[in-house]
Structure formats: C-alpha cells, structure tokens
Amino acid sequence: MSNQPYEGRREAYDPYQQPQTRQEPQQGADWPQHTQQWEGRTWETQAQAPVQGADPSYLPPGGYQAYGEPQGYGGVAGATLPPEAPDRPWNPEGAPAGAGAAGADVPAPDGGALPESGADVAYGPATVAGQSRLTDAQRARAEGRSPIIEPGIQPAALTALLALLLSGTAAVGQYALVAPLVLLQAVTAAGWFRLNGMWPARQGIALAFLGAVTADVALLAAGRGNAPAAILGTLGVWVLLTLVLQLRSHADPDTRMYGLMATVASAALAIIAAGHLAAEPDAVTVGAAAVAAAILVRALPLPTAASVGVALLAAAGAGFGVGGMTDLGTQGAFLGACVGVCALIGHRVASYDYPSRFVHFTAGVALPLAAAAPAVYLLGRALG
C-alpha cells in the first residue's frame, strides 16, 4: 500500500506562485475538490493585467488572501495591508464610478458624495505606497469654498471658563493667578505645534513650556516693576537655546528651519502669556472678562462681519461692567474693546486651514487669551 494518499497531486503547492484560474479536476482524481483561489487584484508592487472574467469591483471578505493561509499582506501570516491602502478596490476604466458589484451607490470613505460617472476619482491603481488624496482644505479651495473652520461653541466655552479663572484669581492675588496661567501656557505650547502640522513634537512642546515657567518664576522673583526685563530676557535666552538645539539636529535643512520657527513661535507665545502675571490685577480682571464675552459671542451662528462687530461690542460692554467694580471705572470699556480685538485675532489664527479637533481644543482655547496678554499689560499700565 502506498504511503502517499494523494498520488494524483504530483507537484507540491507553492504559496508564492502567481494566481491561476481555477481548473476543474480530472475524473477519478482522489484529492479534495474544495480548493479555491481568489482571482481579484492583489497588492503587488507592479501593475498586472486584470484576469479575464473576474469582477473588478469584488473585494473578498476580510481582505485579499491566498488559500490555505491566514489573512495577511503579501502571503505572510499575521501581516496586514499597509495603512495608506485605500479601503475599497480600485475602479478600473470602463467600470462606473461609485458602483459596486450590483451597480449600487457606495458612500465615500470620508462621508461625502462620490463623483459621477466619467469624473476623476480620488483613487488610482492599488500600490504598496498608496495614492495621494486631496485634503479637505485643497478640496475646499478647488470647489471655491473657504478652507477656514472656526473652533465653535465648545472651545469658546472652555476659553470663557479659563478667562473667568484668570479674572477671579487675579483679584485674589498674584500667586493665585499662577495656576490658571500655567495651564494656559501649556495649552498654548501644545496647540501651536499641532496648528503647524507638527505632531508629535514632545521636545518642542516641553521646551516652550519650560520657557514659560521660567518666565513666571523670573516675574515672581523680580516683581512687576522688572517685568519687561524678565519676559524679554527669558525670551532671548530661549531663542538662543532653541537655535543651538536645532543646529545639533541631523534632519535636512528645510526641516530644521521649519522646526526652529515653530519652536521659537511657540515659546514666544507661551512666554508672552506671562504678561497676565505682570499686569495690574484690575487690568487682568477686566481684560479676561472681555475675552470671555468676545469669544462666546463670536461663536454664535451669525455672519462673519456681524459676529465680529457684536463680539467687540460685547467685549467693550464686559469691560465697562467689570471695570465699574474696579478702579478702572469707565476706562474698562476701552480696555475691553482693545483686548477683544487681540482675542479675535488669536481666534482667527486658530481657525486657519481646516484645523483638527485637537487644534480647536488647544490653540482655539488658548490663543485668544495668549494674544490678549500684551494689551492687558500695556493698557493696564497706561490706564492705571
């Protein structure tokens, strides 16, 4: 009796051979007849001609795989498709765009509508490197829409909450103001890097935040009378330190220059936010309340021009109301209006070029208050 139960199967199965069309077994063959091979496209580095008779829009359940192997990429067990691979098969020429095997419409991966038949599709042939896709901002520009999305009501509410914390603690004392100020500086440093598309950037965020804390300590040690020297001195040292660290980087020159500019700007914003600690307590109380009112009104669903005008009026009104409870009096309206302008500028910067949700809840929250710090310090000294 032969020890080979499958004498009709002469050649050994090679899992790496090219897929072939299915052939019917010969009569009398005693090997199992349940083998199957997929005839669709696979993720190869070179484009191949489509198999005759294969349905180009069919995607096997669980991804492409060979018979007798676990699901994986390239025939290797446990591997997966590359992250840049599209989540639906390529639509070849001649097949209707956005139609499946039965001709039904298939929703786009990003939730938008697929182009009609004959229009350019966002996917090309399947490759290992993937195909580049238009960003939301590029698509908005191509369609004539504005690529600007404002943070919205939730980040505005967080900005108002942080502003009220600054306003209340400033009335208590300088040391009580440190806690919300440090939180503001940390969110500013993190949000600026993400706003510039640099993530993760832990070293840059840590460096900018350390500069802000250093400025706070210098202010507390030197006093409000020496606030310009403490802030500008810390800023100068941090610019030099950032330059030295970037010169030691092994990245290409363009990347180093981009990282240098982002780190210097982040550190500058976080350090300048210490102006709230250097300003007069009444100015901080009035200015922070004005920022809270301006940002909340700016988040209302109004036309842009009307929203900006009403937000400035709200900032002036908040400054007038809170200023009446301090020594500033009616001058608080002028302070509130000027601080409101700076806050709206910071709000506009955080809305640039389709930012992500993380940007809205970091830069969108912190930049209005950070941008208002110089006005609070300078006007507080001038009006006081």
Image (tube, rainbow, N blue to C red):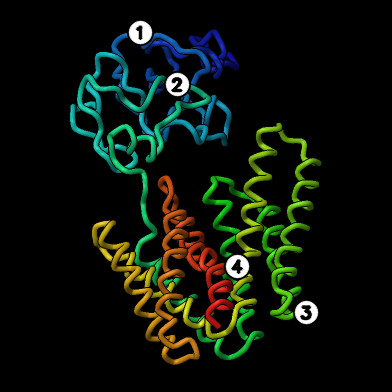
Residue visible at 44% across and 88% down? 329
Q: Of circles 3 and 1, which is in front?
A: 3
The answer to whether residue 112 is above or below residue 205 is: above
Instruction: Tell me if residue 214 can be seen.
Output: no
Q: Of circles 2 and 1, which is in front?
A: 2
Considering the numbered disc 1 on the image, is that residue within a helix, a strand or a loop? Answer: loop
The answer to whether residue 215 is above or below residue 61 is: below
* Residue where numbered disc 2 is placed: 42
Considering the numbered disc 4 on the image, is that residue within a helix, a strand or a loop? Answer: loop
The answer to whether residue 34 is above or below residue 134 is: above
Q: Which amino acid does label 4 sit on?
A: Ala
Per the model, the C-alpha gap separating discs 2 and 1 is 32 Å
* Residue where numbered disc 3 is placed: 221
| Chain-order first, disc 1 or disc 4 | 1
* Residue where numbered disc 4 is placed: 273
Residue visible at 24% across and 37% down? 113
Per the model, the C-alpha gap separating discs 4 and 2 is 55 Å
